[in-house]
Image (tube, rainbow, N blue to C red):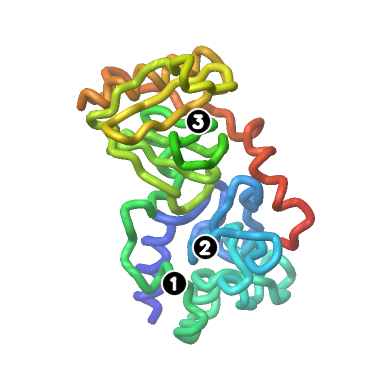
Amino acid sequence: MESFRHLTCSLRDEESTPPHSPSCVELGKRAPTPIREKEVTLCMKCQEPFNSITKRRHHCKACGHVVCGKCSEFRARLSYDNNRTNRVCVDCYFTLVGVSPSPGGLSSSTQRRRSILEKQASLAAENSVICSFLHHMEKGAGRGWQKAWFVIPENEPLVLYIYGAPQDVKAQRSVPLIGFEVSQPEACDRLERRHAFKISQSHLTLYFSAEGEELQHRWMDILSRAGRGEEPLIHQPIVESVEEEGEELGAEAEGENT
């Protein structure tokens, strides 16, 4: 059991530990730095979307992850809190207590294989060609502009990942970029946003709007290269805009329990 716990800890540290959270050795011994609720739209364990009624946000008091009530219905004593009982997630419960929860209490993400969309946004952004918030809209989809977090990973420079927020553990969508053409919107597109551009392929057209002209040009250049199947010539620095842009995504999280 001890050997298995150490192996589980090492794997979890590599794959799912958020920035500034305790390692497995320190788990429960020091307080984590909680991830901001407005940077997460999906439970970081079961990956189900949050809502203000049936799927509310909670913080695991051991690792700092933002999780739903079902994935944090466990209690464990934490040394940093005078050995008092605190709400923890399913993974931390197993690490701290050494007992696996009943099958009914396990999050769905631990019982199935990882899909192509299960690429944690924050980890992908650390090694990305480019990443930033953009507004986007799909032609003919009947939905207006939406804000999301976009990432093109260095290890997959020809794929665009779309996340609801920078700390989400699963992308909403992935778009293979080869074959797409990048251009400025035309008058007939009737877009009312500044710094807009679009990518088109066959019957699919996606519109985007950046926060500034420089960011617009960078995205258009990188997407154009990817559309031609070319990898980026140089590493593009990460666009750091989480602090400002995350405010709008977190409006629904205000007033919810942690």
Q: Is residue 116 above or below residue 128?
A: below
Question: Mark 2, mark 1: which one is toward the viewer?
Answer: 2
The Cα–Cα distance between marks 1 and 3, rounded to whole angstroms, is: 29 Å
Looking at the picture, tell me which residue is in the foreground, 80 or 109.
109
Q: Pointer 2: residues within 10 angstroms few (<14), some, or many (20+)?
A: some
Looking at the picture, tell me which residue is in the foreground, 74 or 52.
52
Q: Is residue 221 above or below residue 178?
A: above
Instruction: Using the rendered view, name the quadrant where residue 86 is placed.
Output: bottom right
**Residue at label 1?**
108
Residue 224's tag is none
The amino acid pointed to by label 3 is Ser
x then y, percent, for residue 189: 47, 22
Q: For the view shown, which residue lies furthest in the right direction?
A: 255
Residue 132's tag is 3
Question: Mark 2, mark 3: which one is toward the viewer?
Answer: 2
Is 90 situated left or right of 257 in this image? left
The Cα–Cα distance between marks 2 and 1, rounded to whole angstroms, is: 9 Å
The amino acid pointed to by label 2 is Glu
